[in-house]
Image: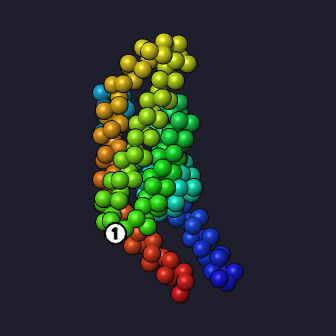
Amino acid sequence: MKVSDMTGKKTRTIILTALLAALTTVATMVIRIPTPTLGYIHLGDGLVLICGILLGPGLGAVAAGIGSMLADLFAGAVAYMPGTLVIKALTAAAGGWLYHHMAGRGHMNTPVRVALCGIPAECVMVVGYFVYEVGMQAVAGSAVGAAAVAVLAGVPFNIVQGLAGVIVCAVLLPVLSHASAEMDARIKA
């Protein structure tokens, strides 16, 4: 591999990481369906999974965490920023790791593979936000048991958001994978 090939690959990786972080921010902010628990359901989780799959678990975690955290910043949800950074990074890392470890396990179509890696990854998101929100309420002075009961009301909405993310990922991944492969081919040419 020539030095120019390595430089081109590094540049492509930096650009793709930044682009996916930005797309994650936009997908989280553009379509927001409010929930009774004062949160909202969005399409950003689909991009979180795509980050982990296209970039791998490491860089995918960076792009997903930063992109999701920026959405919280722009939405004024500053208290959620640290939790979102970690939770979405772990979600992308889990989804990306599972997706890439399924690669050698026989022929599996993309939607099935996305579902098999996306559902456990989104469980990380659901559990992560439950723990984070209980912790926030406990720090604010609530009893942990009461906080857990109060936060439990938001879990079904996070599950719906996670399932929407898996569907968005299954639909967009083939398109973005094709575009990514074309970019690779152009860099090598």
Split into 4 quadrants, where in the image is the N terminus? bottom right
Dot 1 crowding, Cα within 10 Å, few <14, some 14–19, many 20+: few
Q: Residue furthest bottom?
A: 189
Q: Residue at label 1?
A: 107
Instruction: Please report the residue visible at 43 percent of the width from the left and 29 percent of the height from the top.
Output: 130
* x and y, in percent, of residue 112 in the image: 30, 59
Q: Which residue lies furthest to the right in this view?
A: 3
Kind of residue at badge 1: His
Instruction: Please report the residue visible at 59 percent of the width from the left and 64 percent of the height from the top.
Output: 14
Q: Along the line of sight, which residue is nearer the eye, 122 or 8?
A: 122
| Secondary structure of residue under mark 1 | loop
Please give left or right for residue 181 compared with residue 153 in the image: right
* x and y, in percent, of residue 92 in the image: 48, 51
Instruction: Please report the residue visible at 51 percent of the width from the left and 51 percent of the height from the top.
Output: 93
Q: Along the line of sight, which residue is nearer the eye, 35 or 127?
A: 127
Please give left or right for residue 86 compared with residue 164 in the image: right
Q: Along the line of sight, which residue is nearer the eye, 121 or 16?
A: 121
Please give left or right for residue 84 compared with residue 179 in the image: right
* x and y, in percent, of residue 11 in the image: 61, 70
Asked whether residue 26 appears in the rendered view, the answer is no
In the rendered image, the vertical position of residue 187 relative to residue 125, given as above or below: below
Asked whether residue 100 appears in the rendered view, the answer is yes
